[in-house]
Amino acid sequence: MVRIKPFAAVRPPKSIVEEVAARPYDVLDSKEAKAEAGEKSLLHITKPEIDFSPIIDEHSSQAYGKAVENFRKWQEKGWLVQDDRPYYYIYAQTMDGRTQYGLVVCAHTDDYAEGRIKKHELTRKEKEDDRMVHVRIQDANIEPVFFSYPDNDEVSSIIGRYISRAPEYDFVAEDGFGHHFWIIDNRDDIDRITEIFKDIPAFYVADGHHRTAAAARVGAEKKAANPSHRGDEEYNWFMAVAFPESQLKIIDYNRVVKDLNGLSPEEFLGRLAADFDITELGGKELSDGKTGTEKCRPAHLHNFSMYLGGKWYSLEAKPGRYNDSDPIGVLDVTILSDLVLDRILGIKDLRTDKRIDFVGGIRGLGELARRVDSGEMAVAFALYPVSMKQLVDIADSGNIMPPKTTWFEPKLRSGLAIHKLESDRL
């Protein structure tokens, strides 16, 4: 069973929330962040390298020092203010007319260490280390992680009562997604939510595997350094936004590859024909506009779309080339990796090979065609998205999905709530 607790969030006054709130650190490169960051933007804290001209290495001591300086300044200027006591919060997001309602909570680091916070992806040590440094130097979880949990009617009922009120924050970001935020301020409701989650069997990491692992490592580090450790210290907890499973939607996470491993396009198509039924769909115009995009989007599991030499193709995996009874083998990312990326293109490790890159489906199929047409990449593959059921089944079985399998939208905005590990108000 999972443990949660309320916390006194550090957050912006409602009058400037749109100026402070920012996209997550890992969906922007440094140049994009510098162009996007206004004066009060949290990007100055999450991507502090942008405050230097020219932009410096994000992993340098100067950048880390600037992050600490900026977090302090934002509080001194009143752009970030800590609440007077611990609360739970509701964070809702609206995309394409669909709204999902998450609870902003503190989760326990021991639940991650003991497997009650379940992961479905491997992490990369260098990214974990970087996030660990940020948590350690700030003594805070600046950005939340994104969890799912099994639907619970009573939690939904409590949330339903609060969302009938006017929200504390309510804005539409530049990408067209709506962000809405309420404070659960009734003590009985707070206590009841804490009790309900004692019967929730697990959290599932949807997005933020590196931040989750980093938070758990910092908690363990602080525990080891404290001879008077009791277990109730604030550093045992980290910030998460938890959504009911039924409200979440996973979108496609696609692949682009720099070269054809010495093959000509014709030879490559010939090699593919051994394992796939191939149908030519049309030219790059299919990447633009709803009608064209739908025509070249994968239609179902084991159906792939490929962009090669200015043309879109449908690839249908032939029977017997995959194992539908294997929770990992049934995944399209596994099929593509085994039959194409490894066998034909020689890409053995998706986590380290520099010849492959990954493109979230939110960027559209046009982005795949653009990167191939530019000459940067030689071929692109669009995949059918995995389901929440597949994610949960794999996490419950203790298995790990291949890298870059899931892409959740909308992304959580950073800056709506921050959790201090040495809270001023416990």
Image (spheres, grey):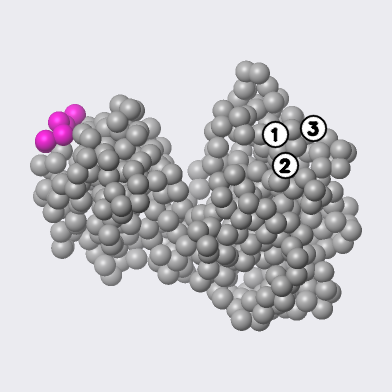
Viewer-closest of 105 and 27: 27
Which part of the image, by quadrant, shows the C terminus?
A: bottom right
Asked whether residue 283 is in view, the answer is yes
Lateral position of residue 193 relative to residue 272, left or right: right
Q: Position of residue 98 (x, y in %)?
A: 53, 64
Question: Which of pointers 3 and 2 lies earlier in the amino acid sequence?
Answer: 2
Viewer-closest of 141 and 95: 95
Are the residues tagged 3 and 1 within 8 Å (C-beta)? no
Q: Position of residue 87 (x, y in %)?
A: 80, 65
The verdict on residue 127 being magenta is no
Alpha carbon of mark 3 to alpha carbon of mark 1: how far? 17 Å
Name the residue carrying label 3. 69
Name the residue carrying label 2. 19
Q: Which of the labelled discs sits on residue 38, or is there none?
A: 1
Which quadrant holds residue 320? bottom left
Alpha carbon of mark 2 to alpha carbon of mark 1: how far? 7 Å
Alpha carbon of mark 3 to alpha carbon of mark 2: how far? 19 Å
Task: Please tell me how many numbered marks the rendered image carries.
Answer: 3
Q: Which of the labelled discs sits on residue 71, or is there none?
A: none
Q: Circle 3 sits in a helix, a strand or a loop, which is it?
A: helix
* Residue range of the region highlighted in magenta in the rendering: 262-267
Lateral position of residue 97 relative to residue 5, left or right: left
Q: Position of residue 24 (x, y in %)?
A: 60, 44
Residue displayed at 50% across by 48% down? 123
